[in-house]
Image (spheres, rainbow, N blue to C red):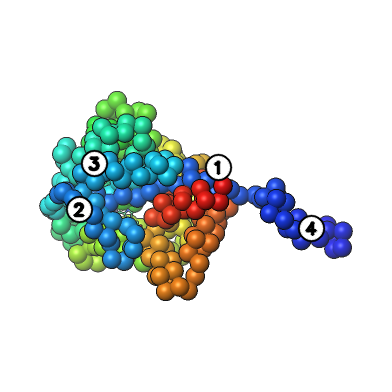
């Protein structure tokens, strides 16, 4: 392979040719849309740090699902904003909790629309941490496992299609898998937030989900952004414990981790294009500094090229429209 025999530009001369040799495709069916649901009626409140993303009340769900379906987006991941928070995060596993009601509302409206739920405690605990605390303010791992398992089962009872634990406790995939199986939900897959980093990119999400820790940070359970080898160990653990899909989160600063996870395990791999990544694009686009459509499609294609099979992204609706236009 040597110039002048090999001239890479030869295959770039027309769109037909470029399309013929294109290695990566981005499809609407790769996209999962995050939805923030709360109690009340007629609520449709824009998240100030995430233009175009809204917290919506239960009654708005049918119209929202219709819109997603018409765009061809196959799935949502639900986050709940409860009406009260307590020390134990009881709203996470309440039978009539916000996520449980949201699942039932969607399934009643459109039984075939694919519903994934985030399984964590931080939106429900008064202290905003992802599990139960001991006296010193440290999240207790094994006690939290039971709460998470109970939460996952309550989602399954409400009819969820897939659960996605995001808490980063050790052993949570095994705990959730065995609890689901014991209750007859052996066909409900687990998408594990396996390599989830203690990231500054979650800021806007915490505004939307009202889940900022009241004190401290999440560095005792989420991963150090400096570590790549450890991500492989986390993924290996989750796969051993029964994860069906593994996730890397955030995505943009962790493209190398996505690639390594895909190469090492060959498992279905999800990338979470998180709130701060979305906010940066929206801010730059709002100022006219970048071409939003091209930047978003380039970024999402980059996740696919890095090895992601599916992408959780707040850009999903826009991306779906743009992908449709392009066809
Ligand atoms: C809950 C959870 C978080 C996100 C997804 N699930 C926040 C956090 O861990 O603090 C972040 C998603 C985003 O930033 O878009 N544990
Ligand atoms: Zn959490």
Judged from the image, the secondary structure of the residue bearing numbered disc 3 is: helix
Q: Give the Cα distance between marks 3 and 1.
A: 33 Å
Judged from the image, the secondary structure of the residue bearing numbered disc 2 is: loop
Task: Give the mark, 3 or 4, whose residue is nearer the N terminus.
Answer: 4
Which of discs 4 and 1 lies nearer the camera? The answer is 4
Q: Nearest the camera: 70 or 237?
A: 70
Q: Which residue is mark 1?
A: 266
Q: Give the Cα distance between marks 4 and 2.
A: 54 Å
For the point 31% across and 66% down, the residue is: 49
Judged from the image, the secondary structure of the residue bearing numbered disc 4 is: helix
Q: Give the Cα distance between marks 3 and 4.
A: 53 Å
Q: Nearest the camera: 273 or 43?
A: 43
Percent x, y of residue 11: 76, 55
Side of 168 where 144 appears, left or right? left
Percent x, y of residue 41: 16, 48
Mark carried by residue 53: none
Q: Which residue is mark 4?
A: 10
């Amino acid at each position: 392979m040597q110039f002048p025999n090999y001239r890479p530009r030869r295959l770039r001369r027309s769109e037909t040719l470029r399309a013929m040799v294109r290695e990566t495709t981005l499809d609407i069916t790769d996209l999962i849309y995050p939805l923030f649901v709360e109690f009340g009626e007629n609520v449709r409140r824009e998240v100030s740090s995430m233009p175009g993303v809204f917290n919506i009340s239960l009654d708005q769900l049918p119209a929202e699902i219709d819109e997603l379906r018409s765009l061809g987006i196959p799935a949502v991941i639900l986050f709940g904003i409860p009406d009260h928070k307590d020390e134990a995060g009881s709203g996470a596993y309440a039978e009539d909790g916000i996520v449980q009601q949201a699942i039932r509302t969607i399934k009643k409206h459109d039984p075939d629309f694919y519903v994934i739920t985030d399984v964590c405690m931080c939106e429900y605990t008064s202290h905003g941490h992802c599990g139960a605390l001991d006296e010193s303010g440290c999240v207790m791992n094994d006690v939290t496992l039971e709460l998470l398992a109970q939460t996952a089962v309550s989602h399954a009872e409400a009819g969820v299609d897939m659960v996605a634990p995001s808490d980063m406790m050790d052993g949570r995939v095994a705990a959730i898998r065995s609890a689901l199986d014991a209750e007859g939900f052996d066909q409900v897959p687990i998408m594990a937030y396996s390599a989830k980093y203690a990231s500054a990119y979650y800021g806007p999400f915490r505004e939307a989900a009202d889940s900022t820790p009241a004190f401290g940070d999440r560095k005792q359970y989420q991963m150090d952004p400096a570590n790549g080898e450890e991500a492989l160990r986390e993924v290996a653990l989750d796969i051993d414990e029964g994860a069906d899909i593994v996730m890397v989160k955030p995505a943009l600063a962790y493209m190398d981790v996505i690639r390594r996870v895909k190469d090492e395990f060959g498992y279905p791999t999800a990338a979470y294009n998180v709130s701060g990544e979305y906010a940066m694009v929206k801010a730059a686009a709002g100022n006219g500094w970048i071409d939003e459509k091209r930047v978003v499609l380039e970024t999402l294609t980059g996740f696919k090229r890095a090895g992601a099979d599916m992408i959780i992204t707040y850009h999903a609706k826009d991306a779906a429209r743009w992908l449709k236009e392009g066809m």
